[in-house]
Image (cartoon, rainbow, N blue to C red):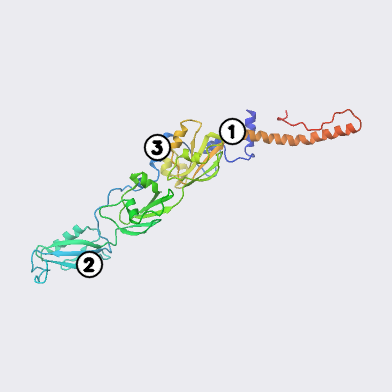
C-alpha cells in the first residue's frame, strides 16, 4: 500500500504518455479543476442507441423527404400562352380565312419582377408562385365575357428558376431544371455526370434554404433513406476529404489513421491502431474524445447547464476488460477527427517509479562504495590485511 502511495506521489514527475484512467475519472467529477471542463460518459447500450439517432444523415437533417410539389413559376421563367376560341369571328380569331385553327399564341414572355405576365384583354396576370393550371383558370375567367368560349393553355417555354445546382467533384457541374416528376440526390448527381472518383473519401453536402448537411457518399448508396428527394434551388456539392482519427497512449501504434471506409466502428478503430499494447495498456481505461452538440449531450445524460458554448467536450469510456465491451465497441460508430486514448496500467507507473528510486539510491551509494574501495586499496598497499572490494556490490532493492 505504501509503494502505491509513493508511486502515486511520483506520477507527477515521471515521464508518461498521458493521464491515468483514475485521473480522467476524478477530473470529470470535479476533484481537480480542469483547464477545459468535460463530461465523462460510460459507454452503454442506451448511449449507443441514442448516438445512433444523431449520426449525421440526410434523412434526419431534412425532415421534408416527400416528392416535390407541382411546378410553380418564378421570376425569370419564360411563359408560353395560347388562347383558343370556339369558332372564328371571336376576340382573337376574327380573320378565319388565313388561320389554321381558332387560336392565337401570344409571344413568349418572362415573368417580370412583380411576378406577373401580360395577356391582351386580360391585363397583368399573376404568375409567380402559381401552377400552369392556376394561371389558365385566371385568364379564362378574365376573357370569358369577351371571347367565344375561351380555353387557355399555359406552358413553360424556358425554365430559369426552380433549378438544382450540382457542384464540386462531378464530371459536368452545372445548374439543372428540377424535374416535375421528382428526383433524388443520386439522380441529380447522375445528371451531372456522376462523381469523378468512386472512393470512400467522397462526401456529399446538401444545402437547402440556408441549412446544410454533409454525409459520406457511401451513406447514399448503402442507406437508401438518405437518398432523399431534391427540391428546387437545392445545392449539392461533392468533395473529397479522407476521414481520420488519432490514437494516443498505450496503443499498439500511435498517430493519425484513415478510416479507409465510409464508416468504421470503435472496435475497428482500435484494431487499426494496432490494438492495445499488452505491456502497458489498461483495457478498462479506453477513452474516446469528441465534441457533441448540447442536444446530443443532454440526451445521453450530461448536465449541459454547467458548460458554455454550443459544443460540449465529451469523453466516452469503454471497459475492454469486460467481454461485453467489445460488442459495444463494435456498434459505436466513429466520426471524423475522433481521438482514442488508452491509459497506462497502474503497474506500469509503479514500475517506472521504483526504477526511478533505484537510480537515485544507486547514485547516492556510488560515492560511498568507491570511497570504501579507495581506503581498502590504500590499506593493502601499506600491508594491512583489509580485503579489497574490487567491484561495487549492485543494489537490488530499496535500502532499508
Q: Nearer the viewer, mark 2 or mark 3?
A: 2
Q: Mark 2 or 3 closer to N-term?
A: 3
Q: Earlier in the sequence, mark 3 or mark 1?
A: 3
Secondary structure of residue under mark 3: helix
Residue named by callout 1: 346
Is 359 located above or below residue 210 in the figure?
A: above
Which mark identifies residue 20? none
Residue 354 percent location from the top left of the image: 66, 33
Q: Where does the C terminus fall, quadrant-wise?
A: top right
- State whether residue 373 appears in this view: yes
Res. 281 image quadrant: top right
Quadrant of the image occupied by residue 35: top right
Disc 1 on helix, strand or loop? helix
SS of the residue under disc 2: strand
Q: Provide the residue designation for mark 2.
A: 108
Q: Going by the image, does 279 lie left or right of 227? A: right
Q: Residues within 10 Å of mark 2 (few under 14, many from 20)?
A: some
Above or below — where is 159 with respect to 322?
Answer: below
Residue 32 against residue 227 in the figure, above or below: above
Residue in the foreground of this view, choosing between 64 and 79:
79
Residue lying farthest to the right in this orientation: 382
Where is residue 178 drawn, in percent x and y? Answer: 29, 56
Q: Nearer the viewer, mark 1 or mark 2?
A: 2
- 285 or 114: which is nearer to us? 285
Q: CA distance from mark 3 to mark 1?
A: 32 Å
Q: Residue tagged by mark 3?
A: 49
Q: Earlier in the sequence, mark 1 or mark 2?
A: 2
Amino acid at each position: 500500500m505504501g509503494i502505491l502511495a509513493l508511486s502515486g506521489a511520483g506520477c507527477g514527475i515521471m515521464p508518461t504518455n498521458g493521464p491515468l484512467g483514475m485521473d480522467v475519472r476524478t477530473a470529470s467529477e470535479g476533484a481537480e479543476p480542469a483547464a477545459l471542463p468535460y463530461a465523462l460518459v460510460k459507454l452503454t447500450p442506451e448511449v449507443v442507441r441514442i448516438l445512433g439517432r444523431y449520426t449525421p444523415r440526410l434523412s434526419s437533417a431534412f425532415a421534408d423527404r416527400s416528392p416535390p410539389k407541382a411546378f410553380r413559376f418564378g421570376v425569370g421563367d419564360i411563359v408560353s400562352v395560347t388562347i383558343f376560341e370556339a369558332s372564328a369571328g371571336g376576340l382573337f380569331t376574327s380573320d378565319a380565312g388565313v388561320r389554321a385553327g381558332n387560336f392565337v399564341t401570344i409571344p413568349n414572355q418572362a415573368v417580370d419582377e412583380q411576378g406577373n405576365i401580360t395577356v391582351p384583354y386580360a391585363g397583368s396576370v399573376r404568375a409567380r408562385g402559381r401552377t400552369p393550371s392556376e394561371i389558365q383558370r385566371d385568364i379564362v375567367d378574365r376573357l370569358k365575357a369577351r371571347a367565344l368560349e375561351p380555353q387557355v393553355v399555359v406552358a413553360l417555354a424556358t425554365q430559369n428558376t426552380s433549378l438544382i445546382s450540382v457542384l464540386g467533384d462531378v464530371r459536368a457541374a452545372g445548374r439543372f431544371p428540377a424535374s416535375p416528376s421528382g428526383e433524388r440526390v443520386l439522380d441529380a448527381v447522375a445528371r451531372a455526370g456522376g462523381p469523378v472518383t468512386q472512393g470512400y473519401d467522397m462526401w456529399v453536402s446538401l444545402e437547402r434554404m440556408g441549412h446544410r448537411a454533409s454525409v459520406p457518399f457511401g451513406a447514399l448508396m448503402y442507406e437508401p433513406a438518405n437518398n432523399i428527394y431534391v427540391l428546387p434551388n437545392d445545392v449539392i456539392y461533392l468533395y473529397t476529404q479522407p476521414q481520420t482519427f488519432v490514437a494516443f497512449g498505450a496503443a499498439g501504434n500511435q498517430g493519425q489513421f484513415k478510416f479507409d471506409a465510409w464508416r468504421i466502428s470503435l472496435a475497428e478503430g482500435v484494431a487499426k491502431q494496432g490494438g492495445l499494447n499488452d505491456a502497458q495498456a489498461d483495457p478498462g481505461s479506453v477513452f474516446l474524445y469528441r465534441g457533441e452538440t448540447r442536444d446530443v449531450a443532454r440526451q445521453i445524460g450530461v448536465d449541459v447547464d454547467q458548460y458554455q458554448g454550443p459544443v460540449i467536450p465529451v469523453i466516452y469510456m469503454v471497459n475492454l476488460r469486460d467481454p461485453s465491451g467489445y460488442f459495444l465497441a463494435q456498434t459505436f460508430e466513429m466520426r471524423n477527427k475522433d481521438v482514442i486514448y488508452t491509459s497506462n496500467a497502474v503497474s506500469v507507473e509503479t514500475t517506472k517509479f521504483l526504477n526511478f528510486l533505484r537510480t537515485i539510491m544507486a547514485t547516492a551509494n556510488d560515492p560511498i562504495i568507491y570511497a570504501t574501495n579507495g581506503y581498502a586499496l590504500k590499506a593493502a598497499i601499506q600491508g594491512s590485511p583489509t580485503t579489497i572490494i574490487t567491484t561495487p556490490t549492485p543494489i537490488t532493492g530499496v535500502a532499508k
